Amino acid sequence: METGTNSLHSLSCTDATKRRVSYFYEPDVGNYYYGADHAMKPHRIRMAHSLIDKYNLLSRMRVIKPKPAGFHDMCQFHSDDYMAFLRAVTPENQLTGPRDLDRFNMNSDCPVFYGLFEFCRISAGASIGAARCLNEELDDIAINWSGGLHHAKRGEASGFCYVNDIVLAILELLKKHQRVLYLDIDIHHGDGVEEAFYTTNRVMTVSFHKFGDYFPGTGHIDDIGYDTGKYYAVNVPLRDGIDDQSYQSIFKPIMTKVMEVFQPGAIVLQCGADSLSGDRLGCFNLSVKGHAECVRFMRSFNVPMLLLGGGGYTIRNVARCWCYETAVALDTHVEERLPEDDYSGYYGPEFSLFAPPSNMENFNTKKFLDGMKVKILENLSRLEHAPSVPFHEVENDMDVDEEEEQDEEQDNDYDDRLSDYDQDL
């Protein structure tokens, strides 16, 4: 049986009914360390957890210590040889196999650190476990802030990500749900997830991201899926400085149309916090409330939803954001004044849950956003109704040869499209 949105309620307002929420957290996750000069700090997850605890939100959820993913679990998507490499490599032995480091894209962005494989097992295990809770209808919303590592590919690391917990969670959800929606509000394009499902109509991927001379350099508006998956990839390439109002002016119409035509049985929402104002690696200007409005809006559809973390490199703002979005998932009011905890020194001098946006220039003109919105809505209108597709093995939809052929075609015209993007649509 499938849970879906066969009769959509009023889409413009939030359904404030209480939901059953589960929260997956491993206390050791904050101990892992990419290195002194690395932007990725797992400590941010522990900081978010501390705020969630001090706001007394844990008592409102089922708190679950995740079971680490096994080797076989992760090989549901990733190649055996890549997983075997991650399991074996250590800081001490990495120099004995430099070819493997290159082969699996292990570099300064994706370094070998102590406990790397266990860190991957925790993140992946929590996302898989959360998906199973949704499948078993134990919860309406499941949260794993240690997940959301959207850049990892089948056979290599990328962009601070080693194991793609999102793909693994979606594969789990597809065991029950005929259609799964993946939504990504990280500032970086959700390339690893899009690539995994580029040729299937059972998963729609939607990514709102910075595009241009910016990692990973993918996610053009004309990347719409391939073969059976044509029009099931939606890319919303944005410019520097987008603020709350501009973001919602395009987010809500597009997501309303997505929900109308795709009618997913489950939603996976990657809440990368590097799209917040003031992020160390970001260039958007969203406030915590503006970012969380995306969670609030998707919650209003009353579809089983998995909330995941992702990017976010100004860690005090990441903790604020994921704490507040936990409260939004619970439909619970929290005070703006932060409670005291072990990390209070990070939040001064304002000690507020809501870090204000800056006065940076917004390069997303109304003309640019309106033109993009029209084009994306036209593509979605080609679907009209939810696809009537039979259940079948997901692997049949993920033909690697077709993906590689399409990637090669896209690489050939990428420079031309990049120059086109510089023009207002």
Image: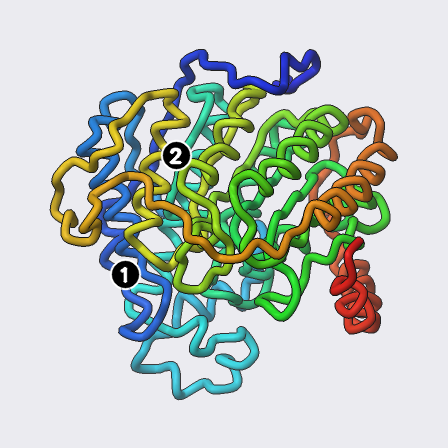
**Is 344 on the left-hand or right-hand side of 425?**
left
Q: Nearer the viewer, residue 225 or 250?
A: 250
Q: Counting residues from the N terminus, which is met first, the one under dot 1 or under dot 2?
A: 1
User: For the residue carrying disc 1, how many other residues have a C-alpha within 10 Å: few (<14), some (14-19), or many (20+)?
Assistant: some
**Is 389 on the left-hand or right-hand side of 173?**
right
Rendered position, 126 above or below 381: below
| Quadrant location, the N terminus | top right
Q: Amino acid at mark 2?
A: Glu
Res 212 → quadrant: bottom right
Q: Residue 175 in the image: x percent, y percent?
A: 61, 32
| Residue 69 at least partly seen | no
Q: Residue 376 in the image: x percent, y percent?
A: 78, 42
Q: Amino acid at mark 1?
A: Tyr
**Is 35 on the left-hand or right-hand side of 362?**
left
Q: CA distance from mark 1 to mark 2?
A: 24 Å
Q: Which residue is mark 2?
A: 325
Q: Which residue is mark 1?
A: 32
Residue at (67, 15) in percent of width and height = 8
Q: Nearer the viewer, residue 379 or 195?
A: 379
Q: Nearer the viewer, residue 10 or 20?
A: 10
Q: Residue 357 in the image: x percent, y percent?
A: 41, 48
- Label 2 SS: helix
Q: Nearer the viewer, mark 1 or mark 2?
A: 2
| Residue 12 at least partly seen | yes
Res 24 → quadrant: top left
Q: Nearer the viewer, residue 367 or 400?
A: 367
Residue at (43, 34) in percent of width and height = 130
- Label 1 SS: loop
Q: Residue 335 in the image: x percent, y percent?
A: 25, 28
